[in-house]
Each structure stands twice: as C-alpha cells, then as structure tokens.
Image: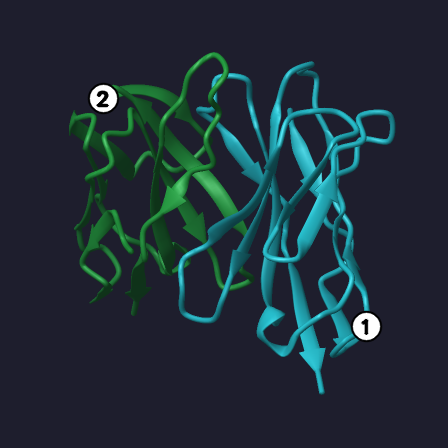
C-alpha cells in the first residue's frame, strides 16, 4: 500500500537558520496529490502546502517544497526559521480519488532563540 | 475559522461503555473522514465517505462503526470501548474530483479517555 516516511522525529534549529524536513513516499499511483500539514499545540492539523506536479516548487507562508518523483520525495524547507514555526509537521499523500489520505509519522520542529 | 464541527470536545468513559461522536461540515464538501491520532501523534485514517457512501474502511476493530446520514454529517460509534481507544478522533472533509484533490480540512477533534 501507499506509505509516507518522515525519518526525523525531532528537528531542532536556531531562529534565523534554514530548516529542512524530510519526506519520502512509496506509491503505485502515477497521479497523486501531496500535502504538508502543520499542527500547533492543542490545535487541529492544517494544510500548509499542496502539490501534484513533478519538479514544481510550491510556496506558502515562507515554506516551500518541490515534488520529485524521480526520488519519491517532497521535502519541506524554509530559509529562515521563526520561533512561531515550532510545531508538529506531517507529510501526506492522497490516492487519485482523494478518499484516502495517508500521513507520515510527523516531525516535531523546535526553533530556539 | 472552523467549518468542521465536532462534538463533544472531550469524553471520559469506562471500559465497556458505548460512545458516539458527531461531525458536521458546512463547506458543501462531498467527502468526509475519520482519523485517529494516538498518544504518539500518529495520524491514521479509519474511514472515509463520499456523498454518504463508505469508500475507505481501514482495518479497525469491529466495535467501531461510522454512520453518515448525508454528505454533511459523519458520526462514529464505538460499541464497547477499550483502553487502547484513548486518543483524539479527528473528523475532516474535502471536495474531491478528477482534477481537484483538495487537502482535507480538519475539525478540532474529540479527545477520548477510557479509564
């Protein structure tokens, strides 16, 4: 079945420095949508980015990600981390019908002063 | 702004009891989901419905049963709760189509504690 792998459980970074959260996937579908979600403490997950186009950069709120089907990756990056970015981040993929969205195990980002 | 409403916010119960959770979306979406987020923050899909038809039914214990009266409502009943059912149950909705895989929008969740 489809799966999403986030290898880092915790990423710590100093404010102002770049950050990268890794996401790789396995799927048998050719056409599929990918998402990054962010979940702040005691809140619901909310979508941060969405993409289904190979090699196209997607940006939102200072974060960006590029889907690379050749390496089955959809890493999340930001050039300058902010204290307010501290949260839990999920990478997810959707089947072509959109009825099954599978999430990775999540990466907690901690930005320190 | 919340457009996926879940009730109750919290529920504490004892092993063996039956519980029901409600979810309603006001976005006109056609697809709704139930997810379970456990204590390790793993987010796993349980069920999804499209226009009140069951589409995805993951491997969950039989004591879990979803119900959808229309495309705006999706409920979840747990017949005889067990300690491992303690978790946050998240409802989500989206609008799907051939070229329109929207990201599911989540409600605030129902936190279940089984004593």
Quadrant assignment, res A70? top right
**Horizontal arrangement in the rendering, residue A32 relative to residue B29 (left or right):** right
Q: Nearer the viewer, residue B44 or A51?
A: A51
The answer to whether any part of residue B13 appears in the image is no
Classify 10 Å Cα crowding around label 1: few (below 14), some (14-19), many (20 and above). few
Residue A17: which numbered mark, if any?
Answer: 1
Where residue A111 appears, x then y in whole percent? 69, 77
**Which numbered marker is on residue B52?**
2
Q: Quick one: SS at disc 2?
A: loop
Camera-near label (1 vs 2) is 1
Chain letter, cyan in picture: A
Q: Is residue B89 above or below residue B61?
A: below
Q: Point out residue B55 in the picture as x, y percentages from the top left corner.
A: 37, 19
Task: Examine the rendering and report whether any part of residue B8 can be seen.
Answer: yes
Chain ID at mark 1:
A
Quadrant into which the N terminus of chain A falls:
top right
**Most distant residue in the bottom direction:** A113
Residue at x 58%, y 74% (from the top left corner):
A84
- Label 2: few (<14), some (14–19) or many (≥20) C-alpha neighbours in 10 Å: some
| Residue at (20% x, 26% y) in the render | B71
Query: In the structure shown, which secondary structural element does the residue marked by tag 1 occupy?
Result: loop
In the picture provided, is B47 more to the left or to the right than B29? right
- On the same chain, marks 1 and 2? The answer is no
Q: Position of residue A81 (x, y in %)?
A: 71, 70
């Amino acid at each position: 079945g489809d799966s999403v792998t986030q290898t880092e459980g915790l990423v710590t970074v100093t404010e102002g420095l770049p950050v990268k959260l890794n996401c790789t996937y396995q799927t048998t579908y050719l056409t599929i949508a990918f998402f990054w979600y962010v979940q702040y403490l005691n809140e619901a997950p909310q979508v941060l980015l969405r993409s289904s186009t190979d090699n196209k950069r997607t940006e939102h709120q200072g974060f960006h990600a590029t889907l690379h089907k050749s390496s089955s990756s959809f890493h999340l990056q930001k050039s300058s981390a902010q204290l307010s970015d501290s949260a839990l981040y999920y990478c997810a993929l959707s089947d072509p019908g959109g009825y099954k969205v599978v999430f990775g195990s999540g990466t907690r980002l901690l930005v320190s002063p | 702004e919340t457009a996926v409403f879940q009730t109750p916010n919290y529920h504490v119960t004892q092993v063996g009891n039956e519980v029901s959770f409600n979810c309603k979306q006001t976005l006109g979406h056609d697809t709704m989901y139930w997810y379970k987020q456990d204590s390790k923050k793993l987010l796993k899909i349980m069920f999804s419905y499209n226009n009140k038809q069951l589409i995805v039914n993951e491997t969950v214990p039989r004591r879990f049963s979803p119900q959808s009266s229309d495309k705006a409502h999706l409920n979840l009943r747990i017949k005889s709760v067990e300690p491992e059912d303690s978790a946050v149950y998240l409802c989500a909705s989206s609008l799907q189509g051939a070229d329109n895989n929207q990201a599911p929008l989540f409600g605030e969740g129902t936190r279940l504690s089984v004593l």
